[in-house]
């Protein structure tokens, strides 16, 4: 039987529970509304993967406009974004002490741990299936750690950029634009002007130049080099434009003699340049043509007409994005293929079927502003 005393006790308990729930709700609301002051982003991968992360970096920057954002990555990547909208400062991922963070029972002391501890929030753009790395970051005192796989699950059928933006949306960070962009400074643009001025005439610069990149990170993704030779000849003869060959250490190693033949064609050579200088030269070009490579993604990100030659990989997942991007590919029935299938492939029909005239026609259309 409920008497007055029992009623008072029940009322007091009910009041206490409701008050406690409300207090917890207010605390949670405060935590959700509390913006971090220092944010760390960590990325590890090649140039193409890095460019595809830029829309995600931009979404984080837009959502936390007042925060100081730092990026840990390879130095060659940092030059593309440091103090260029996305991040305030970059830190090299190649440093002593970081290796222990990949170990479950690794030693977490030292300068790296102190560096991590200064951040309120961290976004990890890397594969961390067992959460070892992210858990170790938390142990240093970072309040919130979010791990974003840079690659969609096999069979998911979604572009890498959309995959990462979707991951951020699930964390409450609205997706921004889905096109990667590189922001060049006036100093960058002056470098390009000076570089071109010393290697070509005023008339050639005014007419415009075309960039070619015959190499790439994987030999399995290369359009036949003889096609690039033919292409360079056609660009000069048919379009009256001079070409820039973008060459890195990998191309010099496995294209060897073919490159020397291209040198004799009076093309300008841009060899072993920092990526930000490559980007500034690309921005001055009327068009770019290249393989499925990081430099192709870079060309698309500076906004010039870009022709990407795809073979064994799926452009619906890995293709460059831009306002003036055309992807050329053939499907001989076996493309796209897996890494294992690619290793067993003795010929690259998916690339060999792309003809020089097809590339030329697409270039004419893009440079005339007729889209893809």
Image (tube, grey):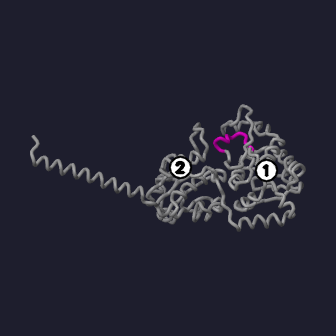
Q: Which mark is residue 148?
A: 2
Percent from the top left, x then y, of residue 65?
52, 61
Please determine whether, in this image, residue 96 is positioned above or below residue 157: below
Tag 2, which secondary structure? loop
- In the figure, residue 301 lies in which quadrant? bottom right
Please determine whether, in this image, residue 69 is positioned above or below residue 134: below
Q: Residue 316 magenta-drawn?
A: yes
Q: Which mark is residue 49?
A: none
Q: Residue 177, can we see it?
A: yes
Residue sitting farthest toward the top:
333
- In the figure, residue 151 lies in which quadrant? top right
Task: Report the residue marked by disc 1.
Answer: 367
Q: Residue 220, can we see it?
A: no
Please determine whether, in this image, residue 82 is positioned above or below residue 313: below
276 displayed left or right of 13: right
User: In the image shown, does 217 or 279 lie closer to the viewer?
Assistant: 279
Q: Which residues are magenta?
A: 309-318
> Which residue lies at the image location 48% right of the left edge and 58% below the top edge?
121
189 displayed left or right of 24: right
Image quadrant holding the N terminus, namely: top left
């Amino acid at each position: 039987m409920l008497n007055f005393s029992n009623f008072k006790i029940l009322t007091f308990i009910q009041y206490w529970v409701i008050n406690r729930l409300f207090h917890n709700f207010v605390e949670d609301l405060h935590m959700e509304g509390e913006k971090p002051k220092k944010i760390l982003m960590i990325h590890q991968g090649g140039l193409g993967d890095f460019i595809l992360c830029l829309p995600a970096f931009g979404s984080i920057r837009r959502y936390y406009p007042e925060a100081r954002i730092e990026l840990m990555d390879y130095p060659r990547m940092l030059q593309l974004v440091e103090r260029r909208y996305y991040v305030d400062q970059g830190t090299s991922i190649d440093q002593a002490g970081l290796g222990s963070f990949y170990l479950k029972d690794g030693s977490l002391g030292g300068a790296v741990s102190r560096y991590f501890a200064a951040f309120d929030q961290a976004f990890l753009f890397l594969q961390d299936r067992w959460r070892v790395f992210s858990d170790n970051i938390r142990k240093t005192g970072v309040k919130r750690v979010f791990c974003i796989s840079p690659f969609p699950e096999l069979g998911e059928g979604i572009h890498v950029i959309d995959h990462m933006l979707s991951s951020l949306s699930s964390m409450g960070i609205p997706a921004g634009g889905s096109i990667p962009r590189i922001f060049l400074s006036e100093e960058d643009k002056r470098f390009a002007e000076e570089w071109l001025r010393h290697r070509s005439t005023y008339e050639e610069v005014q007419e415009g130049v075309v960039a070619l990149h015959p190499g790439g990170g994987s030999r399995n993704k290369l359009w036949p080099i003889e096609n690039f030779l033919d292409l360079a000849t056609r660009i000069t003869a048919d379009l009256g434009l001079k070409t820039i060959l973008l060459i890195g250490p990998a191309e010099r190693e496995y294209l060897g003699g073919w490159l020397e033949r291209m040198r004799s064609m009076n093309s300008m050579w841009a060899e072993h340049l920092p990526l930000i200088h490559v980007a500034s030269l690309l921005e001055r070009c009327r068009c770019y043509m290249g393989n499925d490579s990081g430099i192709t993604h870079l060309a698309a990100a500076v906004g010039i007409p870009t022709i990407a030659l795809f073979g064994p990989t799926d452009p619906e997942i890995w293709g460059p994005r831009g306002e003036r991007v055309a992807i050329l590919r053939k499907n001989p029935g076996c493309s796209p293929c897996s890494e294992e299938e690619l290793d067993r492939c003795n010929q690259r029909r998916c690339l060999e079927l792309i003809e020089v005239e097809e590339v030329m026609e697409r270039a004419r259309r893009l440079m005339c502003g007729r889209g893809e």
